Amino acid sequence: MNGNTTVRRSLFRFLEVLCILVWLFPLFWLILTSLKAEGDVVTRTLSFWPKRLTFENYVKAFTSTEILRWMGNSIFISFVTMAVTLVVDAPMAYAFAKIRFPGKSILFWLVMAGMMIPFQVLIIPLYLQFNAMGLINSLASAIIPRLALPIGIFIMKQFYEGIPTALEEAAFIDGANRFTVFVRIILPLGKAAMATVMILSFINAWNDFLWPLIAINDTIKYTITVGIANFQGTHGTQYALIMAGAVIASIPQFIFYVFFRKNIIAGIASTGIKG
Amino acid sequence: MAIPGNKDTRDGLLFSLPFLIVFVIFMIFPLVFGLIISFFNWNILGTPSFIGLENYFALFRDSKFYSSLWHTFEFVLMTTPALLLLGFAMALAVTGGSPLKGVMENVFFVPYIFSMTVVSTLWAWIMQKDFGIFNQLLVATGHGPVGWLTNEKMAMWSVALTTLWWTAGFNMVLFSAGIKQIPKEVYESAQIDGASWWQVVRKITVPLVAPTTVLCLILQVIASFNVFGQVYVMTGGGPYGTTRVLVQYIYETGFKYFKMGYSAAMSYILFLIILVISVVQYLLLGRKEEA
Amino acid sequence: MKGKVSLVLLAVFLSMGLLFAQGAKEPASSGPVEITFWSLFTGGDGEFFDAMVKEYNESQNKVVMKNDTVKFDNYYTKLTTALAAGNAPDVIVVHQGNMLPYVQNGSLLALNDYVDAEVLADFQEAPLSGCISDGKIYSLPLDVHPIVMYYNKDLMAQAGITKVPQTAQEFIDASLAVQKATGKWGLAIDNTTGVYKAYTLTRLFMSMLAQQGGSLLNADNTKANFSNAAGERALVWLQDLVHTYKVNPNELDYDAAMNVFKMGDAAFYFNGVWATGTLEQSGLNFGAAPLPGIMGDEPWAWAGSHTLAVPVQKNQDPRKVEAAVDFIEWMTGHGELWAKAGQIPTRKSVTEKAEFKALPYRADYAAAAAYALETPRTPAWEEIYGTMSDMLEEAVTKKLPAKQALANMEKKINGIIASY
């Protein structure tokens, strides 16, 4: 019996390691391709490891494009989007979860319906609207349409519903008002949901492509996602350069993830909210 | 709620206000605008001309609309069950007793942070027929090359596989949050009863994460119906349009051919389809959740 | 503790973001006229083009041109949206084949009163005529880029082929000879969609129709016109290369076709002249020639043309229009720089320049401009082009019965034309 368990355990560990390797392989390939000379990328037969590794694609990306500025723009846009999304969406989610007010369920379904509309249909109306407001070609134009994040509201609402109403009631009896309750009780307890929404909204803003492409004109105001799209040649793909651009564009997201991931896990573990 | 001086209505409005302002101006308004556009023939540069429901009638005669819609359904059917199952399996792995669970959690989630463009470009390169690593590995081991993205039977599966790699981690996070909410005592008592791992999963975990499953399912179906980027970057809708999904067709008619009215009309039909399916799902599954 | 770390990180990120984001202040406009341009050139093309803009800015001190690049794939989306809202830059690039909708909707400024007569006379007639509607000049052609033939000299020598093939049968024979002698592919015509659509098929198909005296659409562009003997002959040839003679790979995408030829794995290759730059860098021993008359004596070849135009603005500033025209005149007048990207210049004076004549390959196919096939002038073109590519791809890859495939295509194209 004991030996059997050991075998099973080893088998599981082996499978797990295999899964991890398989899952990581594309990322490994991304990085490896980005470190190859363009001429070594396309080969007739399998050539796993290149003759030499080089940073020339990275050098090219940094020296011949505005990639640092694009990154700066993206960081700015994503952080502002994330912060304002929370300010706008968290109270709404709380209202959906805990406050009884007329029209609530209709509004909730409207918000959820907003999640189902293909964003493409909004682009032209939004563009004309932003143009009328004089916001085209500003960083703000990339931020505003992403502030109402229905899925974020949904996640926070689900979470807030799990917070016992007794906690709030106690505070009300002590004379606290809604706002105090929201700031003092709900927000701290809802940290985990907030962290999830923050990540989502950050990733969304960072990865947005079509809208910032249309709304922003100046190359120096591009987001990184829009900027590195130009690594695709008019008449031919330079794989190594594109992969290098992809790696560079993903670094800030990666750092961001590494930090906030811990917060989520800690959040879920520490709040002790159990459905 | 028995609170003295109940101000729920006022509070509800106040708490909704910031969101409502953004929502109405930047979502509802353009949505209504889009709906109006769908009744016009408009090439965006010229003057729109009102044609009533003609765009909607035209759409029902358009075979490309049907084929694109079907491809979208195909994608939904391919990805939704797989993404739920894989997300759940991953969640089981990362909430279990493995010493590798922390590593796995990060590894499985990490693809999700990469942008659609990065993921699709990368996988299109990996699956490239002549020079991609998949086929070179196959050829080196004595197999024939596979037309991952160029064979009409394979292409959509390849895109689905890419999507699986990209987004399964998100479902994993939702599921593992659900699993972690299950009280430890439930598991402990099951162990005392001598239940096997599989029995525990089937009899305890699965039923108890049902609310999460419903949430995942609804979100996933919506996301899959809106699929566009991966397909567009990886296959361009090819080979010969066999992976063209509806949002791609909407994008092409609107932003390449500038038939704004027609494009908007299709968007609203897609919207209706998603809405109906979501409501049905909610009614069928959500009720169980509340019971 | 962890909270503090992330706060600090947040602050660092934010300030970095602000730093980079705020650095984007434009200089006050006094002195030179500042004008803006949207380009769709990326990759190698982009490098050559940006260098030209830089040289223009350095060549004089009256005009400063600011160039923003949008990926070709999304360029028209952005341009059209901006034009609709009166937000377009001072100068734009438009493919001759994409001009019509902008002309019809009054988005482009007629340049008759701005362009120097002498400069106008310097343009070759064919490319310029593509930019004129009802006597009004809406843009000036920067280049002509026909589809041409590239051939691998080494493979030809190994197969003992001394003469570059010209006719449909010669291509088949030569390809079979190459395949037999070297085991390499005879041809590398892309026939599936990858990062790029398989436009080469459509381009060849159009060219081969014209070579037989036909055309893709009828004379007034109201009906498709290829479901006939000429269309059948062209399609069957394309299918036979892949299926009957097996001298061209199946399921080959655009990038792969380029790579196959670049690596010396195929003897003959059809692509636009833009491929020259890339092929030069690869060190391949190759030659270039105008597309032969595969299906007939007149070697018509599909050709595109990048033209430069001035959008109509809400408040048109005459100083900017003049600056824009000055830029366009300079750019077209320095076509020898643009020819580095493989493109054929449009000004007679440029083809006379020693710098242009010194470039290899370009002179070999410069003659192709005489048989450049203009894109049909219909607002439906973009949709026709995409649909044709999809359907030809299917017909070639799956070897659909030619007659029926063409009839289906024609029906589809007619439906598209009717919907505009």
Image: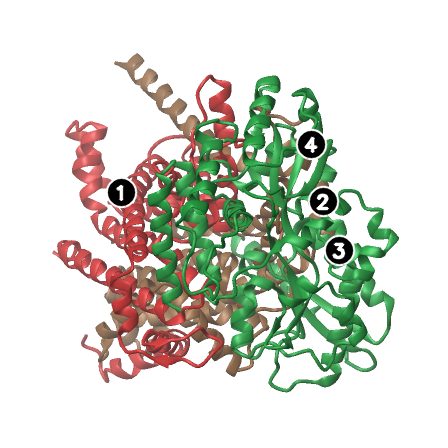
Chain colours: A brown, B red, C green
Residue at the image position 62 percent from the left and 76 percent from the top: C311
Q: Which residue is mark 1?
A: B81
Under mark 4, the amino acid is Leu
Q: Which element carries disc 1, helix, strand or loop? A: helix
Residue C346: image quadrant is: bottom right
Under mark 3, the amino acid is Trp
Under mark 1, the amino acid is Pro
Which of these two is toward me, C248 or B81?
C248
Q: CA distance from mark 4 to mark 2?
A: 25 Å
Chain designation of label 4: A
Callout 1: few (<14), some (14-19), or many (20+) C-alpha neighbours within 10 Å?
some
Which of these two is toward me, C233 or C81?
C233
Chain designation of label 2: C
Residue at the image position 33 percent from the left and 51 percent from the top: B224
Position of residue C33 in the picture relative to residue B117 (left or right): right
Which of these two is toward me, C35 or A274?
C35
Callout 3: few (<14), some (14-19), or many (20+) C-alpha neighbours within 10 Å?
many
Q: Are marks 4 and 1 on the same chain?
A: no
Q: Which residue is mark 2?
A: C277
Camera-near label (4 vs 2) is: 2
Residue at the image position 65 percent from the left and 61 percent from the top: C306
Observer able to see residue B237: no
Quadrant of the image for the C terminus of chain B? Answer: bottom left
Q: Which residue is mark 4?
A: A53
Q: CA distance from mark 1 to mark 3?
A: 53 Å
Q: Which residue is mark 3?
A: C338
